[in-house]
Image: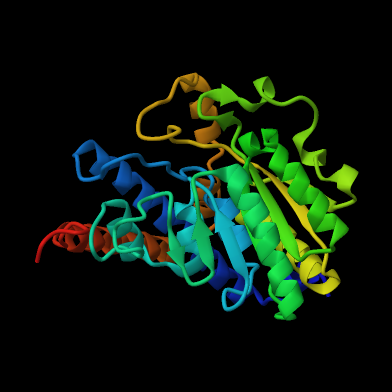
Amino acid sequence: MNATSLLSTVSGQDQATLALEFYRQMLTIRRVEEELLRLFSQGHIRGTVHTYLGQEACAVGVVNALDRGKDVIFSNHRAHGHFLAYCDDVEGLMAEVMGRAGGVCGGVGGTQHLHKRNLYTNGIQGGIVPLAVGSAAAEKFKGSGAITVVFLGDGTLGQGVVYESLNIASLWSLPVLFVVENNHYAQTTPYQMAHAGDLSRRARPFDIRSAALQADDVFRVHTAAAEAVEYVRGEGKPFFLYLETYRLGPHSKGDDLRDPEEIAAYRARDPLIKLRNTLPPAGRDAVEQAVSERVARTVAAVLAQPLAGANP
């Protein structure tokens, strides 16, 4: 049974419950990211912050198609959304980004070096792709039944090691799902100025099955991801899932040179608002209140923690 038919068997009541849960996850990511930008502006965060604003449907749609108990995730510098969709550890994430002792990595990894269970992140996107392929090889040789998913951006498709990784994954029939989140910009450079050709077709010369879609509907993303996961797990072969999305926030902190009218046009098509408009007011309002209260409590708790490495 494919993912589409699986979703079609869910009752109306269960679909409504799932929609509210997806909204909770997406809204949690949105509120955490907004709060991190605010905290950075107040001097509570050292270094940098790459937020996931606008891309929430990608993380929630894909991660909820995985088996969190055994599948392996590799993410990049823009990893907060993937992390929260995977484990929902709001306090561990915020404490880590703020360099506090209670962070998921003790406050020493920061925003780009997160790790929890089977999720690993690193700011060098070209570097995580071969690592993910190696992980998939290990899971195949162990016979664990697990797959590996790697989230990469459009800019990463300019790295030669990505194509070496695609080649090995196909040649060795490895259970790895490549998820490209094309948010249209590599820092401040439009992706069309950095890449020739159709990015969604990059895996085809390696005989890797692929799918491309607009990531403006979390259920559509989830359906495509579930079908991809089913293929990778069942056939033991790689898959290339290409998601067209848009980064609503700056590349990091406040470095944003894009046309404000362009950003406004994409805000009008915000996947979070699109989902919100389908929800019953009572359930939606309850989710929003719960998420806001949770994030506020978390900020207060994290600010009270000692800095990583501070003397007791």
Q: Is residue 82 above or below residue 214?
A: below
**Residue 256 rendering spot, x and y as whole percentages:** 43, 25
Q: Is residue 295 left or right of residue 224?
A: left
Which residue shows up at 89% across the image and 43% down it?
205
Q: Quadrant of the N terminus?
A: bottom right
Q: Is residue 135 left or right of residue 201?
A: left
Farthest left residue in view: 312
What colouring does the structure picture have? rainbow
**Residue 298 rendering spot, x and y as whole percentages:** 25, 62
Q: Is residue 91 left or right of residue 205?
A: left
Q: Is residue 153 left or right of residue 234?
A: left
Q: Quadrant of the C terminus?
A: bottom left
Q: Is residue 163 above or below residue 279?
A: above
- For the residue pair 134 and 71, the one nearer the viewer reads as 134
Which residue shows up at 54% across the image and 70% down it?
118
- How many discs mark residues in the rendered view? 0
Q: Is residue 205 above or below residue 143?
A: above
Which residue shows up at 79% across the image and 57% down it?
169
- For the residue pair 154 and 130, the one nearer the viewer reads as 130
**Rendered image quadrant of residue 109:** bottom left
**Residue 110 rendering spot, x and y as whole percentages:** 35, 52
Q: Is residue 23 visible?
A: no
**Residue 195 rendering spot, x and y as whole percentages:** 71, 26
Q: Is residue 87 visible?
A: yes
Which residue shows up at 58% across the image and 62% down it?
73
**Rendered image quadrant of residue 68:** bottom right
